[in-house]
DNA sequence: TATTATTGTCACACTTTGTTACAATAATAA
DNA sequence: TTATTATTGTAACAAAGTGTGACAATAATA
């Protein structure tokens, strides 16, 4: 693990990382009809934040984002979308990070690199909730899923970042569905519809939804799947692999 | 003018700017049925590049983008869209910038900040060709419009940046048309259609186009406009101001 | 005065979408 | 065993949206 928030020592200079640039990740999961996102909680501070990381001097920024995702969830080969750069100077507030470091027992210099202004390149990912293993970083004592519908207060402008990620997700849903990873390998049309309804926040007509999904040409129908429900067994589907 | 490429002295440290971060602008203009973009040409180097700039320590990055646009075109209040961050480490190649600086007669230190790796936050804008006044920066001796259809070779990965900007423009055209600034204050339906056809690179049916545009509810019909053509005078339109 | 180019609008077919309906079937209840 | 219930696959129809061509109107030019 090479993230500065994961390595044993957090140095005073940020050596080895691009200065002033951070990556924030909005990691969506889907479970029991609810959208979840992954948040870190910092010890003794009541502060919740998005998983974040920095970019190594010889690292591509998209690779850095994948590394952060892998470190927090153990997941690789996940669709990740760079959706916005948050670069207002008003984002800069050293107080929360100072509180986190002090709660961790670190001696904090006013000039510590973690207290300076950062521009955040933000990404969102949609992961299979059942396969992700939340994994806190070295500054936080928990990493867990939170319901998007009842989101607690977040650090800095992270609420705003989540909001923008959700808007992007809704807009891009059709176009990017095939790359997403919110469902298991195979799924039923009903499961797909409930995913859509949850993400879009509205109910959809069953008949029209099925027709639309099939017309996208990205679904492959498999044999029927007996799922123990008191009804006709639905077909199973998976996304077609050949682009 | 506060851009480092505009100020008289270009110091050795980049003091006052966020390190390692640059802004590249793809500025589209529309003229005589062709999409144009604004490029800088550097003295004695044959190098063409997108207008670029850096971010002041106390400046919002979106403001920095607007500043770069204003410095190169004189235009303010223009729609500007942040469309991607180019952050691959492979972008880094100090050779062209070194050639530019040497051609300008500058003594170039291997460690000069302009030769280091930059992450580029890229924006695109669509401006009224007739109102923009191209204005070269201090390192280049010309700033002019080039046909997008026959684009010359550009510096570094700027070709790639232009390509991505164009894709974003085509995808977002309907949703962002009202904010764009490619046409004069008032225009005819035919002018709007030719703009669409040029951007999308395909012909559209006149009747359907008019119906679709009117159904968007963003056009306000004004009195007929005698334009000297050998035909019926078309209505003039403008975009409705009240959102 | 006729011709030409473009415009505004309508008409019609065709496609897509919204909605309802109905038969099929797997578990459960009676 | 049989009825009931929940959900599924699909068909049917209406409503809305699109693609395409036709036609009259009109401003400049021949």
Image: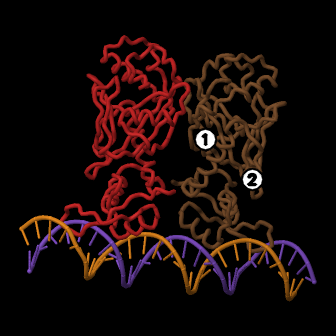
Chain colours: A brown, B red, C purple, D orange
Q: Give B241 or D10, whichever is nearer the viewer.
A: B241
What residue is shown at x 67% (from left), y 63% (from top)? A202
Chain letter for mark 2 = A
Where residue A32 appears, as percent x and y from the top left, is 77, 57
Q: Is residue B202 above or below residue B131?
A: below
A136 left or right, relative to C12: right
Disc 1 with disc 2 on a shared chain = yes
A217 left or right, relative to A187: left
Q: Give B185 or A240, whichever is nearer the viewer.
A: B185
Where residue A109 appears, as percent x and y from the top left, is 72, 16
Q: Is residue C3 above or below residue B157?
A: below
Q: How would you rate the neighbour count of disc 1 (Cα within 10 Å): few for under 14, some for 14-19, many for 20 or more?
A: many
- SS state under label 1: strand
Where residue A95 appears, as percent x and y from the top left, is 73, 27
Give the Cα separation between the discs numbered 1 and 2: 20 Å
Q: Is residue C29 above or below residue B186?
A: below
Disc 1 marks which residue?
A123
Looking at marks 1 and 2 on the same chain, the residue that comes earlier in the sequence is marked by 1
Quarter of the N terminus of chain A within the rendering: top right
- Tell me, for residue A194, which label it has, or none: none
Disc 2 marks which residue?
A149
What residue is shown at x 39% (from left), y 12% (from top)? B108
């Amino acid at each position: 693990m090479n993230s500065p928030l994961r390595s044993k020592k957090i140095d005073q200079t940020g050596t080895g990382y691009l200065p002033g640039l951070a990556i924030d990740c909005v990691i969506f999961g889907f479970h029991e009809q609810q959208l979840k996102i992954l948040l870190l909680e910092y010890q003794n501070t009541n502060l919740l934040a998005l998983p974040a990381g920095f970019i190594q001097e010889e690292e591509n920024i998209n690779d850095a984002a994948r590394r952060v995702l892998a470190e927090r969830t153990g997941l690789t080969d996940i669709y990740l979308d760079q959706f916005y750069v948050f670069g207002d100077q008003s984002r800069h507030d050293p107080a929360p990070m100072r509180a986190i470091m002090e709660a961790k027992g670190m001696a904090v210099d006013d000039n510590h690199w973690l207290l300076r202004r950062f521009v955040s390149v933000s990404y969102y990912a949609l992961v299979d909730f059942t396969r992700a293993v939340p994994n806190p970083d070295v500054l936080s004592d928990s990493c867990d899923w939170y319901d998007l519908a009842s989101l607690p207060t977040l650090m800095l402008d992270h609420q705003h970042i989540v909001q923008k990620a959700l808007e992007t997700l809704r807009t891009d849903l059709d176009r990017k569905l095939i790359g997403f990873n919110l469902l298991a390998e195979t799924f039923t049309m009903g499961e797909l519809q409930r995913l859509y309804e949850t993400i879009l926040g509205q109910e959809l007509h069953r008949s029209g939804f099925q027709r639309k999904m099939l017309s996208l040409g990205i679904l492959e129908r498999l044999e029927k799947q007996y799922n123990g429900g008191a009804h006709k067994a639905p077909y199973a589907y998976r996304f077609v692999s050949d682009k």
